[in-house]
Amino acid sequence: MGDHHDDRGADSVPGPDSRDSESSERDDARAPLSRRLILEAAITLVDADGLPKLTMRRLGSACGVEAMALYRYVHSREDLLGGMVDVLIGDLHADQLAARRREDGWQDFLVRLAHGVRQIALDHPELFPLIATRPPEAPWVRPPLRSLRWMETFLATLLSYGFDDDAAVGAYRSYTTFLLGQLLLEVAARGPATTTATGRSPAAELPEYPQLFRLQPKLSQDQSAVEFEEALEALLDRIERVLTVD
């Protein structure tokens, strides 16, 4: 009886070895650092806080490492920006290929792809302008379908549906122009309110412009989804007329 002692107090306080073990387990549970993980973390940060607040220090913290550790995988801020664009466009390519069915026709391919690009613009409004403006892989590759792989897939798909070379190239040009113009306008319209050169908000100056003041309620209505569908339908009709003439 006298030799018995209570070990519960010792067991309740982890020693140095057990703390090291717990830390090691947490490190092991974390996904190994990779370029893909870093780029996905960067996209998440930009979506949450905006592109100007993306720094290597904040990105390193989000990945659980020091900022310098990132440079093994992303060599500069320019590489980081380009990598984020590549992830979004590459994932779109994989998703569209997975959904593509031969029996659906070229119209369905273009409609589904257009909605896929629009979803990127809506989900990542801070990054979509980068998709539109960063240099593509070749001068004749047009954003937002900005990679050689995407251009090959787009042209090969239309050619497989009976487009000739001129019709396929013309469709690529008109389609990418439509996507960029429509979606850049939509993203810009969803941005934060600005001030004029006088420092006043545009609304404060509207009384000086009677027609704008009168029509402002109509002009401010969000018709972007309807406009996108109508413009896409008109584009498909125009492409179809070109095919019929040929």
Image: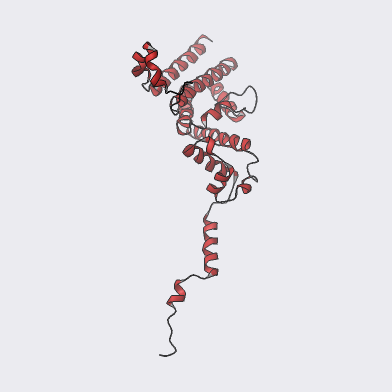
Q: Is residue 110 above or below residue 45?
A: above
- Seen from the viewer's position, the closer of residues 152 and 205 is 205
The residue sitting at the front extreme is 198
For residue 10, above or below residue 96: below
Q: Name the foreground residue: 39 vs 193.
A: 193
Would you say residue 108 is visible in this rendering?
no
Instruction: Tell me what residue is drawn at x 60 percent, y 50 percent.
Output: 66
Image quarter in which the C terminus is found: top right
Point out residue 79 in the picture as x, y percentages from the top left corner. Answer: 63, 37
- The percent position of residue 59, horizontal first and vertical second, equals 55, 44
Residue 75, image x, y percentages: 65, 41
Q: Residue at x 56, y 18 (%)?
A: 173
Counting from the top left corner in percent of width and height, residue 148 is at 62, 28
Q: Tell me: 61 left or right of 212.
A: right
Counting every numbered tag in the picture gives: 0
Q: Is residue 95 visible?
A: yes
Res 225 → quadrant: top left
- Vertical relation: 177 (above or below) 63: above
Q: Please determine whether, in this image, residue 207 is positioned above or below residue 118.
A: above
Residue depicted at 48% across the width and 29% down the height: 121
Quadrant hosting residue 146:
top right
